Amino acid sequence: MLRPGSQFGAQFRVVQNFASAANTIVLAEELNGARRVWLALSSLSASAVDVAVTLEQQSRFALGVPGLARPIASGVDGEIVYVAFAAPAAGSIAEASDAPWRPSRVAALLARIASALAPLHDQGIAHGAIRPEFIAEGAGDVLFGFGVAALATRFGAPGEASQQLAPHYRAPELRAALVAPTLASDVYALGVLVRELLLGPESAEKNGEAVERELPEPFAALLARACASDPLARLHDVRVLAAEFARIAALESTSAAPQTKGTVHDAVAIPDAESSPTALELEPKPAPEIDATRDDARVDTARPPWPRPSPPPPFTPERMPPPKPSNRSAWIALVAVLAGFVLMFGGAIAGTVYAVRHAHPVVTRSHPAPHYAAPSPPRTTVPGPSEDPAPAPGTSTLPAKKAPKAAIAHAPLVPPGAGPSSFPEDARALVPVLGSEPIWGTRGGPLTWVLFGDLECPHTRRAWRALEAAKITFGDDLRIVFRQRPLREHPYALEAARVLAGLEKERGARAFFSVLHRIAQDDSGLSDERLLGLITGEGYAGLQIGDLERAGESAVAADLELAGQFAVRSTPLSFVNGLRVEGERTPDELDRILLDERRSVTWVLASGAPARELYTMRTSGNLIGVGDQEATRVCVPPAASPSRGPADALVTLVEFSDFECPYCKQVEPTLKALLARYPKTLRLVWKDYPLPQHKGARLLANFAAEASARGSNTAFWAVHDGLFARADEIDDGVLGELAGRAGLDGAPLLVAARTGAHDAAIQADIALGERLGVGGTPTFFVNGRRVQGVLPPEQFEALIRSELAGAERIVAHGVPRNKLYKLVCDE
């Protein structure tokens, strides 16, 4: 048994062992302290390479599945195979102490699980590890453990994968024979889980009849169908289970019948009778392209049979026509739209009024960077924000990982910029920067991060540590504004906010941020004595808490007024050039947010927009979408990918595509026409994104990549054009013929394709696409602007012309042609 504190493998330290069995789940942390992980351990005979390859093959079926966590590492330690998943800070539902759960809470969790599990079942893949230790309730991924059962099936004894489940989660057929988990056994385990949540773990250990009598009859009947002994009698679609449970929970919440033992009623919205789904209506149509008779836990990624079947299109740009609304629905929709406009512009007007009322005629104060060095931020997944008046239900009992205290060196984080902290125009922005707030940075910074925080909120403190690290990275490009939003749940928060606001008023922003840095180092509580000690320790002796509190009262009141206008009810909450960011973010997430905004801002400035109007422009566009705003741009590095067109083209079009995608084939004539029309100003870059439902797409991607490696860029495009032109007749003979037309021997290309010689490069393209939010093919990025699906030729050309005009303006402002795309790819 792995005990807490013991080391596992070469990189993990055990924090908690969920179970003492051979197939167990361990909460661990990386030895370097970067993050916490869940380790799934199994006694299997396999090499680390075999484990990694199997998980990679399995992960192809998880592309685009929402809420499904993917492994971050795997390996072998002795005879134990481990798979690591990034552990959410909120912990698993097995760690929740507030059981039994309310039906509405169970319904919400069940809906998220179904959204992650249903796409796997649609592809004939059983998850095989539906257990509470692998399920998280908080934001982010909900279902973990994907691929663990597949490993046990491939490398273990028959039925080894079924041992991943606790005995009462195993379906009867898994107990009676040594067989791998199936789709039906997943439904059974999910039904047991739901029943356990409703009744609590102790009640779930009773026999089936006793449990069902303690549940209201509709819940008991539904779960009896999910947990039927006969697999054929079970609900075969987890979406039906989730929808039916939500419907029953809504009806039960309004029932006048007295509560029965073990029943928890709560208020949930009742679906409209016309739109409420029934089990019959939600039964999915059979998918003919999926072989339901195959082993659910195995994935065969060998060479696909030729000729290949015609798979369903992976990405459908067309939209289904909406149902005709009734008159009542039309009136409701009209009222909702009008109310939305009122709220949106009402908030904008309120912000503007606030700015006018609180603006100062002349702003001359300069706030250089505070003199301290920030600690290295913890690289962990962080919990959600604190809320006012009460925290969200289901908060994990797992203790938060405290950041180590850092010694404060009195030296600036970055060389401070010169000049005042704000333009006069900034005071008229929708999220105003008046110049009188605590500001770290200068008005020349293209990025402004306005943070509403609570000094006693642990999430605010972690968010501040991440911002300190971002300030080191982005330097004078980043301006940080701190706004006070004390929450009622923290009794000393209001007084602390007033004291620090008074300190800023008396001694300036340097004093404010140096004390804030000390406060953010840990989650210790605040008091008059501790706060005075921190202030004195930073060299500001002689100040009295009462005097500072009175001095800062008006500033905190102004911050609370602004927070109310933007409905800031939880902390931390931020606005990045007007873009609303809820809760705290990891340092990596924060960097991505800032990088994406900086690309757009840099493009705007390079186009000639005045710097003094930049913050007002970006805030108006990001917050309410008003004004002629620059589109959000993301970095898509061309790297060594195949390309057509000049390297210094003014417009770079990056395409994520799939050789078996019918829509990718459909767009080819448009792309060729555009390249012919703009031969000196347009570049097309190819990125592989083979979809899992296209069984031969990865082989074809390897074939084309090998043509590029053995021949040239020209050979790749020759094979590329041939693959799309003859997509309906691909076989070994056709592939050999295409290689010959490219001037290559087809045999080595076929060998490389079947052995996956370029799988690593293809997977790198897929990973890049996933980071950029690619969910289907074709997806394009035109100078960083995302375009998904097949546009009509005239719309595509209009987009190219628009980007070309902007690029020409940027070049006219002095940016060399060969540096233009770096304005987007500034990583």
Image (cartoon, helix red, strand yellow):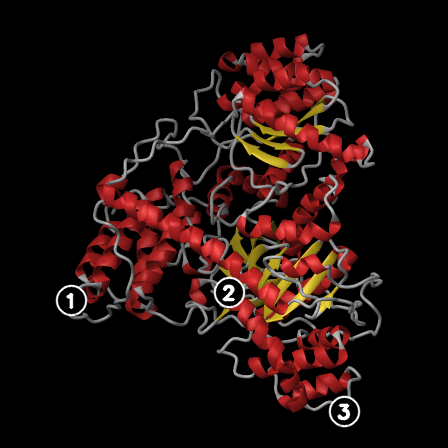
**Does residue 18 appear left or right of residue 742 in this picture?**
left
Residue extending furthest toward the front: 361
Q: Is residue 115 above or below residue 718?
A: below
- How far from the left and from the top, in percent, is residue 787? 56, 33
Mark toward the viewer: 3 or 1: 3
The reply to whether callout 2 and callout 1 are in contact (CB within 8 Å) is no
- How far from the left and from the top, in percent, is residue 754? 60, 24
Q: SS for tag 3?
A: loop
The reply to whether callout 2 and callout 3 are in contact (CB within 8 Å) is no
Q: Quarter holding the C terminus?
A: top right
Q: Is residue 647 above or below residue 637?
A: above
Task: Give the amino acid type for the residue marked by disc 3 in the picture.
Answer: Gly
Query: In this rendering, does residue 652 appear at all?
Result: no
Nearer to me, 609 or 655 = 609
User: Residue shown at 70%/44% (left/top)?
Assistant: 599
User: Residue shown at 71%/40% (left/top)?
Assistant: 824
Residue extending furthest toward the left: 257
Task: Give the amino acid type for the residue marked by disc 1 in the picture.
Answer: Ala
**Does residue 556 appear left or right of residue 644 in this picture?**
left
Categorize mark 2 by other alpha carbons within 10 Å: few (<14), some (14-19), many (20+): some
- How far from the left and from the top, in percent, is residue 319? 40, 31
Nearer to me, 97 or 481 = 481
**Does residue 46 appear left or right of residue 68 in this picture?**
right
Residue at the disc numbered 2: 565
Q: SS for tag 2?
A: helix
Residue at the disc numbered 1: 256
Query: In terms of sequence position, does the residue under pointer 3 or pointer 1 come before the other?
Result: 1
Residue 542: mark: 3
Mark toward the viewer: 2 or 1: 2
- How far from the left and from the top, in percent, is residue 740? 67, 8
User: Residue shown at 72%/73% (left/top)?
Assistant: 513
